[in-house]
Amino acid sequence: MIEGKGLGNKKINRVNVSLSNRTNRKLNQLATACNTKPTTLAGLFIEICLNDSQIVHKLQEEYNIYTPYKVIPVQNNGEIDYIFKG
């Protein structure tokens, strides 16, 4: 499929996540409170986190063990893109 051709705002990439029972319950409760589906809300959380340079930095500080794969968030036309550090 040609990227961006005729897709509009359609989501085409699926990601499966495994949540603990407690986290799933919290997600369902918040989704109900926000009048949305849990999967939609989880996707929104992922999008927000990936576009927040402080969260990206904190995650890499804690979990990144391969320096060549460390990403640097850069602002590009109002959106955040990543470039590899090394």
Image (cartoon, helix red, strand yellow):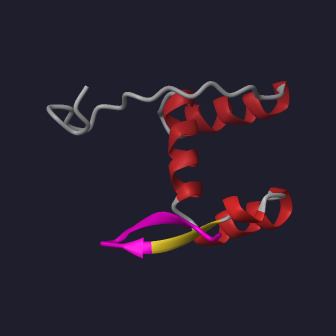
Count up the numbered dots.
0
Q: Residue at x 74, y 28 (%)?
A: 24
Place residue 31 in its image quadrant: top right
Residue positioned 63% across, 39% down in the render: 30
Question: Residue 57: image x %, image y %?
Answer: 70, 69
The range drawn in magenta is 75-86
* Coordinates of residue 37 in the picture (x, y in percent): 50, 27
Which quadrant holds the N terminus?
top left
39 over 69 or under it: above or below: above
Judged by its main secondary structure, the magenta piece is strand
Classify residue 2 by image quadrant. Answer: top left
Left or right of residue 35: residue 67: right
Query: As rendered, which of 45 and 75 lies closer to the eye?
Result: 75
Q: Position of residue 53 (x, y in %)?
A: 59, 70
Task: Indicate the position of residue 26 as horizontal and vertical percent values.
Answer: 73, 36
Whether residue 55 is in magenta: the answer is no
Q: Is residue 11 above or below residue 59?
A: above
Q: Nearer the viewer, residue 34 or 51?
A: 51
In this view, the residue in front, 78 or 20, is 78
Apparent side of residue 74 relative to residue 52 in the rendered image (left or right): left
Q: Is residue 6 above or below residue 70?
A: above
Quadrant position of residue 54: bottom right
